[in-house]
Image (spheres, rainbow, N blue to C red):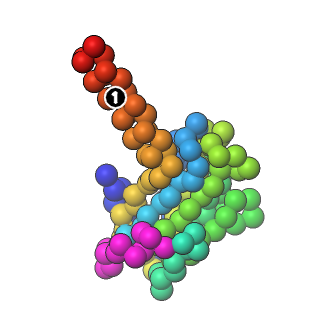
Amino acid sequence: MPTQVDIVEGTFQMFKIETRKLLSPLKLYITYKDREITQSDLEQSNEPKKLNKDLRILYSQTIPKPEEYNCDGVADGVLCLTIEASDERVFNRDYVYLKLSTVDGCQASLKLAFPKQDVFDNKQNKAFESQDEEATNA
């Protein structure tokens, strides 16, 4: 379920996303109030697609209040932000911290996804379903 944000002009909001033991990457999809996300936006490559928006996202896997001088990365006006675990295929840190800021103000919805985790969980669920069917038929 998306999280609605309304960032007042000249301010920021902080977010903490639990990531420990989840498969990398984390994807953050941003839908701006005046623009719907399209299927081609979701299918884009790892290159962030930029819009003419002043939403700035700073992120860190170690710093709870990321700033430009100490963050892992910065993304401006993107529709999708991909954050990879540091040198691992699984996040070893408890959280990813986000700071969203804007000069002109911004209304958007944010949706998190761990695509590889979702695939892994689906495979696990299907394996359990198969075992349950075998046990029932035996």
Q: Dot 1: what SS?
A: helix
Q: Residue at x 36, y 56 (%)?
A: 3
**Residue found at the very far top of the displayed protein:** 138
Q: Is residue 34 within the magenta segment?
A: yes
Residue furthest out toward the bottom: 52
Instruction: Name the amino acid type tagged 1.
Output: Ser
Q: Is residue 93 magenta?
A: no
The foreground one among 126 and 118 is: 126
Residue 108 in view of the camera: yes
Q: Which residue is mark 1?
A: 130
Q: Which residues are magenta?
A: 33-44
Figure quadrant of residue 22: top right
Q: Residue at x 75, y 64 (%)?
A: 69
Quarter in which the C terminus is drawn: top left
Seen at 34% across and 28% down, the residue is: 130
Residue 97's x, y, as percent? Answer: 58, 51
Q: Position of residue 102 (x, y in %)?
A: 50, 73
Q: Nearer the viewer, residue 98 or 44?
A: 44
